[in-house]
Image (tube, rainbow, N blue to C red):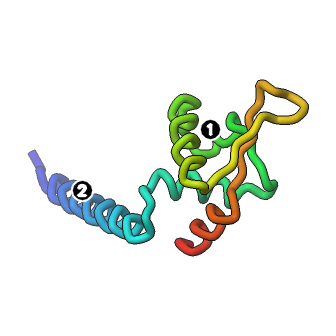
Amino acid sequence: MDVSPMGVIGRVSRALRLLERGVKEFFAEHGLEAWEFDMLATLLRNEADTMCMKDLSAAAMVSPGALTNRMDHLVERGLVDRWPAPDNRRMTLVALTDEGRRVANDIL
């Protein structure tokens, strides 16, 4: 049996661990976790100023429950604002604050 592909898999796995460590350290230097930047970047990429939580959940590929917890954290940090939609109180809208936009742009 040819086991040479195992060497490639091992090197790719090692490269992935190094990349993940570097990304984690980079975001830590800016006072963020990778998931926090992912949320900020998803909002920043949106052409409209706001997104509803449902669309944000789909765009960020995060479950609605996880998204609620993440938004609670980001609201507490002053990086996003969240409020009920004026025409549909069952819908929640989210937008970057000025500070959230500054942090996301600084990292980019």
The picture places residue 97, in percent across and down from the top left corner, at 69, 58
Residue 13, labelled with which disc?
2
Residue highlighted by disc 1: 57
Of the 4 image quadrants, the one containing the N terminus is top left
Is 12 left, or right, of 71 in this rendering? left
Q: How many labels does the image show?
A: 2
Q: Depth check: give the residue in front, 103 or 3.
A: 103
Q: In this view, does 52 lie above or below 6?
A: above
| Disc 2 residue crowd, few under 14, some 14–19, many 20+, Cα 10 Å | few
The picture places residue 92, in percent across and down from the top left corner, at 74, 35
Residue ID at (81%, 27%)? 89
The picture places residue 82, in percent across and down from the top left corner, at 70, 43
Residues at marks 2 and 1, CA–CA distance in whole angstroms: 29 Å
Residue ID at (11%, 51%)? 3
For this orientation, the residue located farthest to the left is: 1
The picture places residue 101, in percent across and down from the top left corner, at 66, 65
Name the residue type under label 2: Ser
Q: Does dot 1 land on a helix, a strand or a loop?
A: helix
Q: Does dot 2 land on a helix, a strand or a loop?
A: helix
Of the 4 image quadrants, the one containing the C terminus is bottom right
Name the residue type under label 1: Ser
